[in-house]
Every structure is written in structure tokens, then in C-alpha cells.
Image (spheres, rainbow, N blue to C red):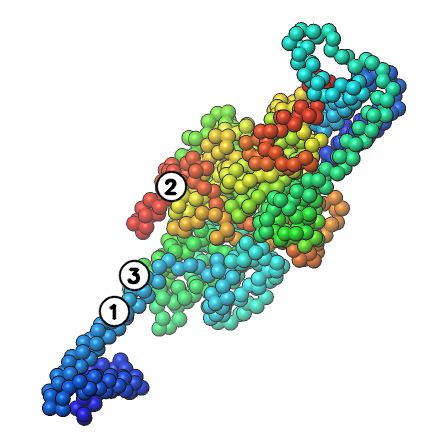
Amino acid sequence: MATPATAPVNMNNGDAESLTSEQKKQLKKERRKEKNAQKEKHNIPSKPEGQEPKIEKSKAELRAERRAKQEADRAAKASKKSDQVAANTKQKGPRVPANIQADDPKVQKKAAKKLEKQQVPQRTEGQKKVALFSHLHQYERSLSITKNIGFGKNAIHPAIIRLGLQYAEGTVTGSNARCAALMSAICKLISDYETPPQKELSRHLESKLKPAISFLDQCRPLSVSMGSAIKYIKLQITNIPTGMSDSEAKLRLVKSLKEFVHVNIVLAGEAISGYACTKITDGDVVMVFGSSSLITKVLCDAHNAGIQFSVIVVDGRPKLSGRGTLRKLCRVGIKCSYVLVSAASYIMPEVTKVFLGAHGLLSNGYVMGSVGTSMVAMAAKIRGVPVIVCCEAYKFCERVQTDSFVNNEIGDPRDLLVQNKSELTSPLLTNTAWEETDSLKVLHLTYDVTPPDFVAMVVTELGKIPCTSVPVVLRVRSLET
Amino acid sequence: MEQFLLDLKQEQFNGSYDLAYKTINHLRKLISQTRWTHAQELMNTIKKEGKRMITAQPSEYVVGNMVRRVLKIIREEYVRLLGESEESANKESLHKMLTAEGNERDDHTKPLKELKTTVIEAVNEYIDEMEASIHNISAQAIEHIHSNEVILTLGKSRTVEAFLKQAAKKRKFHVIVVEGSPLYHGHELAKSLASKGIETTVITDTAIFAIMSRVNKVIIGTHSVLANGGLKAVNGAHMVALAASHHAVPLIVLGAMFKLCLLHYSDIGGSEATFNRLASPQEVLDYYDGGTEELVNVQIYSPTFDYVPPELVTLFISNIGGNAPSYMYRLLSELYHPDDHVL
């Protein structure tokens, strides 16, 4: 009787690490019960003489059974652990950014903590968000960002603060302008940077860069061009050779950033202009939408090359950026017309080509541009007018998106309203009317995506490609770097 | 009368219902106050007046509609008083046509004593029908809007406003109102709807395509309905219709029967333009910005109307019920007489 009782204890010592003492006790109790039950079974039919060997046999059988069971349990536990490990590695796929999860409180809490650690002030959300866009942040210009900026040791560089305010107020707009301004501000930051003792430049500079980028993101969500530039900066910082002195490294960085702007914006613009001008012929009526520095450049170059064409500028509220394009083109001497986007289909019978600029090109061929680009492309496609998109290759991104909801930038709703009805004839809503009426919401979208079947061709510095070849270009560029 | 013509020329009216109401009141006054002996003389007077009104403002089709409707009313009443039913009259005329007895066609010259009173009564009935048209259309609202729908509308149409408010009494839904540049009447509509507790969102014209993927139905009003089922609607309606057809969203048009015209779409421009009229460019680019020296040569277009082809329209809802656009031409024969097509 004693040996069977002790036998399970010895067995248990084998995997004592995985079982707590309580579990061991429970197992012991269970096995004892099992034992007794089995003994009962054997005891009832057999005679007292044959009891001992039969019990012995059953003991051995039971021991074997127990061993087999424990092996099976161990195997099951091992496979479960490997499954978990596999699951953990599977979870590390593409990460969903926090700025499109504004409706998830956990994610927002984490983001807020991160900002606090970096000593970047967090912007307060605006009021009366449109339910369809509750996953995106909505800020209002009147609520100050810089009120809580400190001046301590780890403060953000003043050039970055200035840049952030320029973004938030709308002084610097346009993807190329924003990227160039970002690069020049980062150059200043790098030139003023001093590595603290016992720290390495490549590691510490990156940690100095992170709060700056977070601050700029709070002022205005980063554009695709800025994202591309920041990736490049980080790559350059990690590629600094280890032996280099700090001053040398800083000079090298500043030089490479300036070169990035020169190659990807200025030289690319020249190349694109050269390709695109071959597409404009005498007598063309070209339609453009809003403002794009690249498209303006293309048209001015074509005019200077002596091609006779006229331009129709389509514009949309509230930015009315087409007026800037109109001025620039008229100054050069191009014959222009001006309509709002609601009249685009009215004027479309006159148009022979449409040139559109892009904020970014997505990996599935969709063109992300300022809101209204898709309207013009749609009106053109219906009448069979070719749509040509001009975009530098650094604005191609790996993101994919099929509609304008999942990822967008919500602007200040007050841009669509008037301050007060000073001119009685203004039909627009006033700020007070919007604030007072609960069920009234105003939506100010910044971007929209155009499906690739509306676009005939994309002109980049690498040549003229169809919309769907974006991932090919991305791959080529990633192999180059 | 002169004041009315002046108002027409200077575009001083408040929408097509207002204009139709004024026109028909004017015609009723004409019937009761002028001296005439038989129906043909009355019809000639009305045709002459009608021509004057139409030439004052050729792009407003509602005036022509009212004139032709009154002429049809006169013909009907004349035939009724003579004791012949309408159907037999039609059959007779077909028989007459086939047997080449054109000389016996009635030229409406029999003087009838009760004609004046019956015509004025019929015109009053028609005016009542017109006044009740918005109510009849909005009574159908509950059949077309279900719960939790997202409905898109453009600009400000009295019919659409009444329609949505009637549906909001029983159902909960969201409305997205497009501003409607360059006049931005959408803001007024949004305020009016939100004050009744309907969830309203105002968006700009540029965001129509972006938003359309989330919209269940587009409901718009129209200025007039053309004979082929196409629309003459407010500027911007064609863009909305294109976006809706791309996303396979049904487009429902609300319009009373007095908006249905005999004319077809023509894009003749210049002095003969009757379809569209270009409004002041002040709304698009005001003089402060556009009057500078560098922008002085810029052409600015501000069309008032848009042509929407019938293929983009899914359903018409009028005071007599719902119809497909391909059926609209049939309703013309009930409203206007073929002899009045050319005044």
C-alpha cells in the first residue's frame, strides 16, 4: 500500500518545475482515488490468493499509464508554447499608426504617454466631430499648441517650433514646400546640435529628432513627402561611419539632406517637366486643379518653350488655392480661365487634357491628392479626356487605401464658415450657428483618393508609367538605397 | 404685366414654383379680364402673351409650361362643353386623318356661354393642384427613406426640404448637404434641417466623390424636367450624378408636374442660348481679387444650370407618384396638346 502511494510522488519530481505544490497535491489525491477505484474493481471478483500478483500487475500497468499520460501532457505543453511563440511573431506585421485610431482610448493613452515622455505638448481635440471620421483627429486652429512649450534642457529647437506653427497656420503648404522646409529646419537642428559627453552622435541625435517629429505631427499630420524625407534622414544618421568626428559627421549629414532636396525635388522637377512638355501641343486646352508647384512649373516651362496653349484652372473651397496658380500662370502670359469645381463638367467639352498634381501615390495605384482631384478626374474620364498625373518618385508610399475615409486629414471646420454675418448677403453659416445647433456638423476634408482607372498616365523622373506600376518603382528605389 | 416682364428679364424671382404661380395667376387674370367671343380668339391672345413672356426670359422653361398648360385646359373644356368625350374626339380625329377629311376639324370657333366660367374653374383647380404638389410629394417620403440611411442632397430645394422633414417625423437618418457653389444655399438647408433635429453634415463640392462611397441615396430637386427625362438642375448636379453613378448610388429627383417641359437639351451658345445662363462672375472670383491687372484677362464661367442626362437618373417622384425617366415623355401628352408645341 505504501509503494503505490509513494510512486506518484517520484513520478511528479520529474516535472516539478512546471507544477506548483498545490497542483501536485491535487494530482496526488486524484491518483490515489484512481488507485482505490481500480483496486476495488480487482478486489471484488478475484480470490484472496491471486490478489497480490494481480495488484502487482495492475500497479505496473498503472505506472506505465501514468508515464504515458505525463509524456502526453509534456508534449502538449511544449506544442502550446511553440504555438504561442509563433503567434507572437505573426503579430509583428505592419503596425497600424496611432493617428488613425483616435476612437480607441487605449491607443490614445499610449500615444499621450509617449508625447509626455518626449515633452511635446498634446493638442486638444476640436469639438463636434463628424461621426464618420471619429477615427481621425480633428483640431481647431484657435486652440493654441505652443502655449505649453517649455524652455528646459530638452526643449524642442526653435526652428522646429517655427516650422510647426507655419504648418498649423497654413503658411507653408504644398507637399514639396513642406518637405523642403522640413529639411532646412532639420539642417539647422543638426548644425546647432552638440553631442553630450559619453554619448554617440548617431544614437543620441535620433533621440533628439523624435520629439521634433512628434511636435510637427501634432501641429499638422505628416505628409507623404515628409515621411519619405524622415526615413531618409534616419537612414543617413545610422549610416554615419563610426570613426568620424562630430563636426565632420554633422557636415556630412547637412550635405546629404541638402542633396536629397536638390535631387528629389529640383532635379526631379526638371526631368518631369521635360517629359510632360512633350505631351502638350499647340492649341491644347489644359485643365488643372488647385495648386501644385510641379504642375505650375510644367506649364510655365511649356509656355517658355513656345507652345501655344490655354489653361482652365479649377478651384474648390475653402482653400481656393487655384487663385495662386491663376496668378502665377497669368504673370508668365498664359491665357487662363477660372471655374469652380461644380462647373467642371460644364466646361469639360472644351478641354483636351487634364494635368493633376499628387500629394502621394499609393501602392495599389490610387492617387492621393487634395480634395477635389477625384471630381475633376471623374468628369474628365466620362468625356474621354486623358488625365495625366505628375508626381516625383519620392512621394510614392507603401500604404494602400481604397477610399478617402480610412486615412485622411480633417481640417478646421471654421474655415468653411463665416465669423459673423457682417455682410447680410453672405449665405454661409456663422460660427455661432454651427456651435449652437447640436445636430449640425461641418466636414472639412483635406485629401481624397482617385482610383487608377481614371488616370491615363503618371509622369515621374523615371519616365512615364501607368498608375499600377507604383510598387515596381518603390522596389527599385529600396534596392538602390 | 409690364412689371412681371421686367421681373423676368432681371431674374427677380424666387425659384420655379414662385415663377409658375405668378405666371398662371397672370394668365387667369388675362382670361377673366380680356374680351373674347370664342375659344380660338382666347387661345390666340394667350399665345401672344405667352410669346412675350418667353422671349423676356427664354431660359425659364416654367413660363412656357404654364402657357401650354392653360391652352390645353381651354381645349379640354371646349371639347367637354360640346358634349363629346375626350377619347371619342381623339378616335374621331384619327379616323378623320385616315379618311383625309381634314376640313372638318374643329377650329374652336363655336361661341359657348359657359366657357369662361368653366375655364376659370379649371385653372383654379390647376392652381390648387400646384399648391398642393409639395405636400403630395413629401407624403411619399416615408416610402423611400428607411432607418439609418445616409442621404446626400445638393443646394436648397423647397421640395427636398419638405420631403426630408416629413420623413424625419417617423425615421432616423443622416443627411449630408453639399454646399452648392457658387451660391452656397446648402448652408441654409442644413441649418433648417438641423433645427428639426435631423443629423446634418455640410460638405464642400470638392468632397462629393470622397463621401459618395458612404452614401445610400442621393435626393435632389430640379429646376425643370426635359422631354427625354433629362434634368435641367442647379449647377453642380451633374457632378453629383456622375459620382453617384460611379458608386452605384441611386439618384432620386423630386419635382412637381408643372416642371415637365416639351423641350430637349441643346447646347447652342451665344445669343440663341436658351438652356443655360451665365451668372455674374462676382460669385466665383470677386472684383477685389479678380480685378487686378494681372487677372484682368481671365475668363470666369459661372453657369446657373447643369444638364443631367436621363441615364444617370434612377427615379422621378412627382405629385402623381414615382416614374422612371424613360416614361416621362408619355406624361407630356396628358399635359400639353401637340398643336401647342410651337407657340
Residue A241's tag is: 3
Q: Nearer the viewer, residue B219 or A391?
A: B219
Q: Is residue A440 above or below residue B27?
A: below
Residue B297's tag is: none
Q: Earlier in the sequence, mark 3 or mark 1?
A: 1
Q: Quadrant of residue B121?
A: top right
Assign the N terminus of chain A to one quadrant of the image: bottom left
Cα separation, mark 2 vs mark 1, equals 43 Å
The count of marks equals 3
Picture coordinates of residue B126, whole percent (x, y): 77, 31
Find numbered disc 1 in the image and state the secondary structure of the residue it sits on. helix
Picture coordinates of residue A343, whole percent (x, y): 60, 35
Residue at image coords 66%, 7%: B99
Find numbered disc 3 in the image and state the secondary structure of the residue it sits on. loop
Q: Is residue A143 above or below residue A80?
A: above
Find numbered disc 2 in the image and state the secondary structure of the residue it sits on. helix
Residue B319 in view here: yes
Q: Please name the amino acid that badge 1 sits on.
A: Ser
Q: Earlier in the sequence, mark 2 or mark 1?
A: 1
Q: Which residue is mark 1?
A: A79
The chain under label 3 reads A
2 or 1: mark nearer the eye:
1
Residue B6 in view here: no
Are both tags, 2 and 1, on one chain?
yes
Q: Nearer the viewer, residue B8 or A480?
A: B8
Q: Quadrant of residue A183?
A: bottom left
Residue at image coords 32%, 64%: A87
Residue at image coords 74%, 50%: A421
Q: Which residue is mark 2?
A: A468
Q: Nearer the viewer, residue A378 or A464?
A: A378
Residue at image coords 55%, 63%: A123
